[in-house]
Amino acid sequence: MSAAWWLVALVGVATIAIKGAGPVLLGGKPLPPRIGRIIGLLAPALLAALVAISTFGGDRALVLDERAAGVGAAAVAVALKAPPLLVVVVAAVVTAATRTLV
């Protein structure tokens, strides 16, 4: 099992622990607003980190290949407020086209 999968498993276990500990520790009381905002930002930050590592990471070096073109195209589609399904299709098409041309 690679280090990336160990990290995914660790994040999964930590997520389950945090979600399970909340109701037990708070006893039905709502979270303070500041902590609620922080917890709401954890999942997108972790997802962005995993995407960045899988896109640009390779054998202990920065890799710029077809995947980077796909992520860039997806970023442009998101900036243009495209629907999520279209963002995924644009990223896949650009990645496939770049792999074909290179």
Image (tube, grey):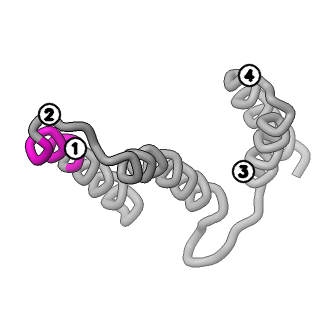
Query: How many residues crowd mark 4 within 10 Å: few (<14), some (14–19), many (20+)?
Result: few
| Identity, as a three-letter code, of the amino acid under mark 1 | Ile
Helix, strand or loop at disc 1? helix
| Residue range highlighted in magenta | 18-26
Q: Which mark is residue 61?
A: none
Magenta-drawn stretch contains 20: yes
Front of the two marks 2 and 3: 2
Quickly name the residue at label 3: 67
Q: Residue at x 52, y 53 (%)?
A: 45
Judged by depth in the image, the label closer to the viewer, 2 or 4, is 2
Dominant secondary-structure state across the stretch colored magenta: helix
**Which quadrant of the figure has residue 79?**
top right
Q: Is residue 80 positioned above or below 26 on the image?
A: above
Quarter where residue 5 is shown? bottom left
| Of pointers 3 and 4, the one earlier in the residue sequence | 3
Q: Secondary structure at mark 4?
A: loop
- Real-space Cα distance between discs 2 and 4? 37 Å
The answer to whether the residues at label 1 and label 4 have Cβ atoms under 8 Å apart is no
The residue that mark 2 highlights is 28
**At label 4, which amino acid type do we have?**
Pro
